[in-house]
Image (tube, grey):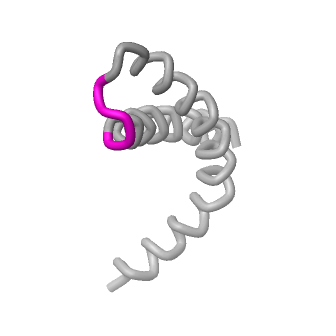
Amino acid sequence: MKHRLVFTAIMSFFLSSLMSLWVTYLNLGITPNFIAQWIHAFSLAWPAAAVIAFFVGPIAQKITLRLLKS
C-alpha cells in the first residue's frame, strides 16, 4: 500500500504539472502572470489527479495485463 501511495503521488504530480502547464499555455499563451495562473491550475489539478490515479490505477493495470497476456 505504501508503494502504491508514493507512486500515485509522484505520477500524479508529474502528469498534473505538465498537463496544467500545457493547457494553461494553450488557453492563455505567455502572459505576465502566466506562472501564477499555472500554479493555480496545478494546485487544483494535482489533488484530483491523485485521487483519480489511486482509484483508476489498479483498473488500468488489470486491463494492461489482459491486453498483453499471451
The residue that appears at 38% across and 42% down in the rendered structure is: 27
Question: Residue 16 or 5: which is nearer the viewer?
Answer: 16
The residue that appears at 59% across and 45% down in the rendered structure is: 49
| Segment tinted magenta in the rendering | 26-30
Q: Quadrant of the N terminus?
A: top right
Question: Residue 47 or 27: which is nearer the viewer?
Answer: 27
The residue that appears at 58% across and 34% down in the rendered structure is: 9
Please state if 42 lies on the left or on the right of 28 as rendered. right
The residue that appears at 58% across and 39% down in the rendered structure is: 45
Q: Is residue 58 magenta?
A: no
Question: Residue 45 or 9: which is nearer the viewer?
Answer: 45
> Percent x, y for residue 36?
49, 17
Magenta residues, dominant SS class: helix
> Percent x, y for residue 4?
62, 44
Please state if 15 lies on the left or on the right of 26 as rendered. right
> Percent x, y for residue 50?
63, 42
Question: Residue 14 or 43: which is nearer the viewer?
Answer: 43
